[in-house]
Image (cartoon, rainbow, N blue to C red):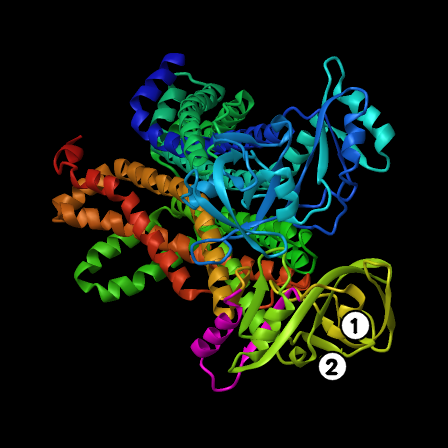
Amino acid sequence: MLNTILAGLRYRKARLLFSSVAIALGVAFVAGTLLLNASMSASYYAGFAVGAKNVSALVASPKSGNPPGDYGGQTVPVRLLQAVRATRGVAAADGRVIGPAAILGADGKVTGNGYGVNVTSDPALSGFTLVTGQLPAAADQVDVDKSTAADQHFRLGQAVRVVTGIGATQVFYLAGTIDLGVNPQIGDAAVLAFQTPQAFRVTGQSGYAMIVARAAPGVSQSALAAALSARMRPLEVQTGAMYASEEATAASHVGDVFGYGLLVFAGISLVVACIVIYNTFGILIAQRSREFALLRCVGASRRQVFRAMIAEAAATGLAAAATGIVLGIALSAGMLRLVKTSPPLVLQPSALLIAACTGLVVTVGAALVPARAATRIAPVAAAAGAGTETLTRRAGRIGFAAVIGALGLLLTAFGMGARMPAGMLVIAAGGCVFFLAVLAIGPLFTPPMISLLAWLPRKALTRHAATLSLATANARRNPHRVAATTAALTIGITLMTLFTVVFSSIQASADDAIAGHFPFDFIVSANGFQKVPPSAVAAVRRAPGLSVVAAEYEQLATVGSQQDLVGAFDHDALGVAVKPAMLAGSLTAVGPGTAAADSGRVGRVITVITPDAGRLRLRIVAVYSSQTYHTPIPSVLISSADFVRGFRPTGPDRVVIDAARGVSTGASRAAVAAAIGSDPLLKMTTFADYKSSLDSQVNTILEVVAGLVALAIIIALTGISSTLTLSVIERTRESALLRALGLTGGQLRRMLLSEAVLMGLLAAVLGGALGIGFGAALLAAFRHSGGLGVLSVPIVRLVLYGAAAGLVSAAAAVLPARRAARTSVITPLTS
């Protein structure tokens, strides 16, 4: 029997190659994803070794764990540095300064958020490494992180204009570039390193973000931390290892989320590959009925036939898994080159083992049902030919599909009424169950749908009507095969349609929210952590052609017994430039001593506790909904006078502006730009700018999703190609007869290409319908949780998906069609 298996593998190597390609691609995606996760995680931890290098212990305020930029938190007093240095076991200690600082670009505006840090007296404790040049040796020198230096094309010795924490501009000269590793708090912001006195002056900080210490020889990190804890209470003390581990874990969480997303798509690719493998083995068994009958006649048992099929599947799976691992390594290496930090590839043995086992298990699992079917072929029945599906099986298939489909719809309905994220998970489960019902009933609706899809082309292309009729008949001939083949492509189209509907609805909902609840023309804001100076507000108010210029304030405060975002707008913006969905009362009633809130009832009195422990007792005069997607409204709105009196801000967070009626957008924009032009920290944003930014974000996400789904679609197309190739081999005599009857080679090619196009269009129609349906269900769940409100179905884009499905299916059929066209007319008929 072993010799028979080996001979079968050699004889059918070309056919098995098609199935192995599909599983190899799935394994490649799994291996690449796992290796990418391992490499990114190792990169994060290695990056944090830069910040924690030489640090045995650190002292920080309990509130200083807030991200840099949240400068309301406490810092460590400078005077405590001497106490740390005097602690037994400390070999060296110094303080790290972190605060706001930004770089001015060539246009006179800041290039983005930035942070100033200091070079400690012991440079090894600074938390960064020198890349080029030298550390600042004079008060007018600065080092810049290597990414910013590259982006801005800085050269050593070049003048760098720096905006300090108080908004002043100062010139420094570039002495070198530095590398801070991976820092989740600073992110992609520019980092500027100064001598310590200049760092305090530029950032405006009065204390250290932390004090770091290096242990003396023979003193462990835990012993040093214990000694510091005894002297530094109530400050927080950590070991260097704890600092590196906690920060790296916080940073790697983003990488984990990205990795989990990739794993989801890897799973989808494997499901598609499993369908392709199942279909391929099913076709192979159907074509080998006489072979199995002959084996049974010469004494092979059912168990031996089953084992032979599983052995073929295992051999195919092992070969495909080995190839997939090599491709996965190349895939992960290529993706890592796209990462800004270009981390090295980590070849994790467990990841490679998981990928290999996955490929083998999927291949063998996909072949189990066809292998069992092979054991049921009786010698005489097989020799006489395969039977057709009985009415009983048809009725049973309909009943099974009805039960499973109803269960899927019930799960989906339940998820639509649940809150996120549980609702999303339930809807996903309902979609998977419903798709099983579609797979079950697919062979029944495939023939009529194929006929319907072919009707219009046959009417429009009368010259090729005969070819299209043959293609339609071939597609209808084996509905089980067509349904199984198109199922893989249907999954890809469903996912693309679903994500397109969801993200298009996000975009439409955000546009609707801004237009309906924040209908202003411009926003003026400061760079990141700054406030808009009152002088700039006054300058904008003096600008011509503007009807509404209103300051906006926001700050977290204690309202009653919980933390809420408290905001305020100048009174002339309420109900005009700010119009949330009102539940009771009117925003125009808000004035000194009153408030509007997103909960409670009109007439209720609330207490707002300000940061300096002051209390504002306010009576609610209006209730509104704050759940506006992408444009959140503060939970409590009070008058500007009460906000200034209670919170004492240095200026508003933003200024909202409306152009006067009859004034063009260009003229009003020029007026606002002229009013704020002298302040490099201020920037102006329009509704069109925001919408363009949102469109760009949505398109970027869709491109990423399309790239991930593309692999599943490639695997599906491999299935179409393998199915048609096997079909061509199966229909060799039929093709020869058609050629003998006058069908040209070109017509035979068009027939097979048309058959593939019909299969692609069938997948597009099913996938589009499922994607729109379950996309709408997801949006209903979001809406139930107070999120999205507008369903947007981009018909043009979905039609393009359908056209693309037909074209790529035709592309997948090019090689099988060429093979069929080269078939000899005489040889198959005489064999």
Can residue 791 be seen here? The reply is no
Q: CA distance from mark 2 to mark 1?
A: 18 Å
The numbered mark, 2 or 1, whose residue comes first in the sequence reads: 2
Q: Is residue 589 magenta?
A: no
- Identify the residue at image location x=82%, y=70%: 600
Q: Quadrant of the C terminus?
A: top left
| Crowd band around label 1 with a 10 angstrom C-alpha radius: few (<14), some (14–19), many (20+) | some
The answer to which of 298 and 145 lies nearer the viewer is: 145
Decide: is 518 above or below 332: below
Judging from the image, what secondary structure is the residue with disc 1 in? helix
Point out which mark residue 36 bears.
Answer: none
For the residue marked with disc 2, what is the amino acid?
A: Ser
For the residue marked with disc 1, what is the amino acid?
A: Asp
Point out which mark residue 642 bears.
Answer: 1
Asked if residue 456 lies left or right of residue 424, the reply is left
| Crowd band around label 2 with a 10 angstrom C-alpha radius: few (<14), some (14–19), many (20+) | some
Residue 258 appears at what percent x and percent y? 55, 41
Asked if residue 181 lies left or right of residue 213, the reply is left
Judging from the image, what secondary structure is the residue with disc 2 in? loop
The answer to which of 106 and 512 lies nearer the viewer is: 106
Residue 9 appears at what percent x and percent y? 35, 21
Decide: is 255 above or below 753: above
Can residue 463 be seen here? The reply is yes
Q: Which residues are magenta?
A: 652-678
Q: Quadrant of the N terminus?
A: top left
Q: Is residue 677 magenta?
A: yes
Residue 74 appears at what percent x and percent y? 77, 46
Residue occupied by mark 2: 586
Give residue 657's quadrant in the image: bottom right
